[in-house]
Image (cartoon, rainbow, N blue to C red):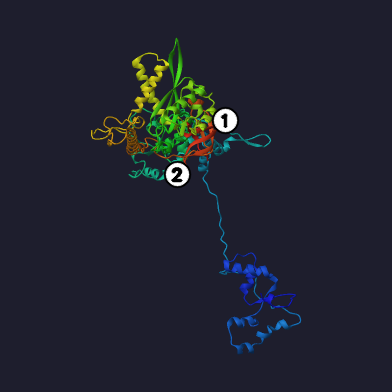
Amino acid sequence: MIIREIEYSFDDIYYYSDNMSVLRYIANSKTRFHTFVANRLAVIHESTKVNQWHYIGTKENPADLASRGATIEQYNRNPQWLRGPDFLWDKDIKFPQCTEDTSFIGNDPEVKKPVAVCTVQSFEGMERLISYFSNWERLVTIAARFVLAANHFRNAKDSIKIDGNGKMSMKMSDTLTTSIVECAERSLISYVQHKHLSEDIQTLEKKCPLKISSKLSKLDPFVDKDGLLRVGGRLERSDISYESKHPIILPKDSPISRLIIENIHRSIGHLGKNSILAVLRQKYWILGANSIIKGLVSRCVRCKKYQGTCAKQKMANLPKERLQADDPPFTRIGIDFFGPFEVKQGRSVVKRYGVIFTCLTIRAIHLELAYSLDTDSCINAIRRFISRRGVPVFIRTDNGTNFVGSERELGEEIKRWNFNQIQEFMIQKRIQWEFNPPSASHFGGVWERLIRSVRKVFYSVMHEQNIRLTDEGLMTLFCEVESILNGRPITEASDSITDLNVLTPNHLILQRPGESFPPGVFSKTDSYVRRRWRQIQYLADLFWTRWRKEYLPLLQRRTKWTKPTRNMQVGDIVLISDNAPRNSWNMARVIELIKDKDNVVRIVKVKTANSVLMRPIAKLCLLVESD
């Protein structure tokens, strides 16, 4: 700043200080300083060079007078304050010589003291050996190789041979024996026991009883001649083997315990927990073995492949089309096909099919007869329904590939339908048509359950008549079954005679509530049409009032799938559930998630070896979770 303010040019600039510590700081470039000094030195080194700094004695330094403080008279009497040091007036300036070494700082509080730290990566060879292997038999074999090599080196004098040329050779056998393998196994187990159960072993070696709080107190343990901790137990007088009477004790949290259980699980063909535990107890007693086995079986990919269950998720909230009141019956419907039924036509027998239309709101049904399984027959059945029940605003069906549940014959025929033609018909009628995901029959449970009821009533009536129906008879039977099911209660029955009758779909469809339903009071001046309209309106309002109070609360409870579970993730490996034998189910990988309004994954896209499919999680068995 001073140089910028003085309007002169300088050939050389020198700096003088009588503080030896400052000169040492500036001259030293290797030593580390504390923050304040380090920041000041950085500014000095950025704007000056080390050879510009020199030493000046305190008596010759005019700045010393200002730093100590003085009066004006003292300043005037001191010639150095105005003239500077005398050596600056010499023709050849000789810098004052410093008698101290500026390169050595010594014990200065502003200097960071270096601390020599020697870091050594320490590990135990046995621990590293155990953690390296994921197979118990392989671990024991390698440990046996170490034991074999140690024995050879221990007996090296006997195995060294010198030939005629003076060359020395040592012959080593690479054949493992049973005794060496058993020795290696004992070494591994002894290491684990002394690492995790050392306190109990020391107590037993001192011939002292174990503490009551010890995990081994109920096993009556003892240390055998090989130094291994074994179960004492109560089977000393039995005629079973020594290892079964006194199995080796192993801790729960040791990798060796897990390796032994995994080895047994594989050797017995991936059997369940009880089988693993029975084989394990013949030689080992692992603390907390039940939880280890349970976790192992739940993670085993092969066990999942043959015994794993399909994924589940918390039951979803009901869709809005099932909860909207005050609309006419069959405003929102579900459709499905069922059958076939054999009817008599002249001297021949032909097949007919049923079409069920289910009101999603009041659970009423409408049955139509389909004379074939072509596209026109499906459209005609829908047209007859619309003509009798009115145009719905919403239709939900199963996907085209599983439109008819599990009937193979119907499924193959409906695959040939022209769904574009059906879709055009829906658009003309301004009907919203939605499909359930493929293979998701439980998405259509609202009509699948009613199809079962239809079959039950239908076959009961057919069994009583014991005849083969004609088309007319089958259509009549459909109407009777429809009437019976629409008269079924959708609310709980009461034992009290003062309560209203149970609510049925017929209360809204037929506008006939039954004998105990109050018809209302009307004046004599009302015309018949007005009285009829008021009665119908009254009955409809009463139905929806009871529907809200009595029926909707019944839908509140989740009868199953009550807890949320892990959502499927992209990269999960799954099995696709199929009607084929389980060992032929296709394996796939999840590539896309489809979440519902609650941000829960219920449908996913999976990639198999040949194609990409959309499936509900209920049809997928999780094998391996993504990382």
Mark 1 Cα shell of 10 Å, populated few (<14), some (14-19), many (≥20): few
Say if 39 sits above or below 218 in the image: below
- Locate residue 496: give its quadrant: top left
Residue corresponding to mark 2: 195
Camera-near label (2 vs 1) is 1
Name the residue: 74% across, 83% down: 90
Q: Position of residue 469 (x, y in %)?
A: 40, 15
Cα gap from disc 2 to disc 1, whole angstroms: 53 Å
- Locate residue 81: give its quadrant: bottom right
Name the residue: 58% across, 82% down: 68
> Could you say whether the residue bearing mark 2 is in a helix, strand or loop?
helix
Mark 2 Cα shell of 10 Å, populated few (<14), some (14-19), many (≥20): few
The type of residue carrying mark 1 is: Ser
Q: Position of residue 597 (x, y in %)?
A: 46, 41
Residue corresponding to mark 1: 611
> Could you say whether the residue bearing mark 1 is in a helix, strand or loop?
loop
Q: Position of residue 184 (x, y in %)?
A: 49, 36
Report if residue 604 is visible in the image.
yes
